[in-house]
């Protein structure tokens, strides 16, 4: 289990805030909550914070939603987290657990769900 008080978002705040946002999104989807979550995990299309790894299990659950917008946002955010190169050595323990533990399983499941879902959908208009 990940200690939420030990992980940080891009603002340097405790991962507890990210967890609370994810909990609220699981209860009631809301565009403002997604915007807040994005602003805490992503900077310039990359997730360079430890709270991103910690968010993957919850994002995996949200990706299974029947709500298309909720599913799309969860999959897109999980994709950003999993494709961003690991750079912060102080977060090596999180990257290691992602490679061997449940976080990695959630990332793999989320990525597979993303690929499966995207391949079944018509292209989005630009």
Image (tube, helix red, strand yellow):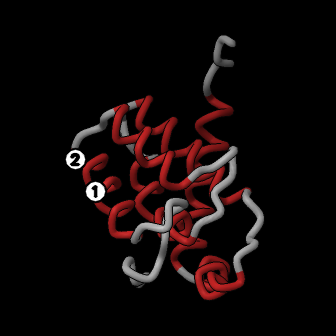
Q: Residues within 10 Å of mark 1 (few under 14, many from 20)?
A: few
- Whether residue 112 is visible to the viewer of this picture, yes or no, is no
Q: Which residue is mark 1?
A: 23
Q: Hey, which quadrant is residue 120 in on the image?
A: top right
Asked if the residue under mark 2 is in contact with the one under mark 1, i.e. CB atoms within 8 Å, the reply is yes
- Whether residue 123 is visible to the viewer of this picture, yes or no, is yes
Query: As drawn, is 8 to the left or to the right of 126?
Result: left
Q: Residues within 10 Å of mark 2 (few under 14, many from 20)?
A: few
Q: Hey, which quadrant is residue 36 in on the image?
A: top left
Q: Quadrant of the N terminus?
A: bottom left
- Residue 43, position in %: x, y? 63, 49
Foreground of the two, 24 or 101? 24
10, above or below 6, in the image: above
**Could you say whether the residue bearing mark 2 is in a helix, strand or loop?**
helix
* Extreme residue toward the left, this view: 27
Looking at the image, which residue is at 44% across and 38% down? Answer: 35
Looking at the image, which residue is at 40% across and 83% down? Answer: 3
- Residue 104, position in %: x, y? 60, 72
* Extreme residue toward the top, this view: 125
Looking at the image, which residue is at 45% across and 65% down? Answer: 57
Report how far apart the C-alphas of labels 1 and 2 lie in the structure.
Answer: 7 Å
- Residue 81, position in %: x, y? 63, 57
- Residue 68, position in %: x, y? 43, 29
Query: As drawn, is 94 to the left or to the right of 14?
Result: right
Q: Which residue is mark 2?
A: 27
């Amino acid at each position: 289990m990940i200690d939420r008080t030990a992980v940080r978002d891009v603002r340097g705040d405790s991962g507890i805030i990210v967890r609370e946002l994810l909990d609220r999104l699981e209860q009631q989807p809301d565009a403002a909550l997604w915007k807040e979550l994005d602003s805490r995990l992503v900077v310039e299309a990359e997730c360079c914070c430890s709270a991103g790894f910690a968010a993957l299990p919850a994002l995996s659950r949200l990706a299974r939603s029947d709500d298309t917008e909720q599913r799309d946002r969860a999959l897109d955010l999980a994709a950003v987290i999993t494709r961003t190169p690991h750079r912060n050595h102080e977060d090596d323990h999180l990257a290691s657990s992602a490679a061997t533990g449940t976080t990695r399983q959630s990332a793999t499941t989320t990525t597979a769900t993303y690929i499966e879902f995207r391949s079944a959908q018509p292209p989005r208009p630009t």
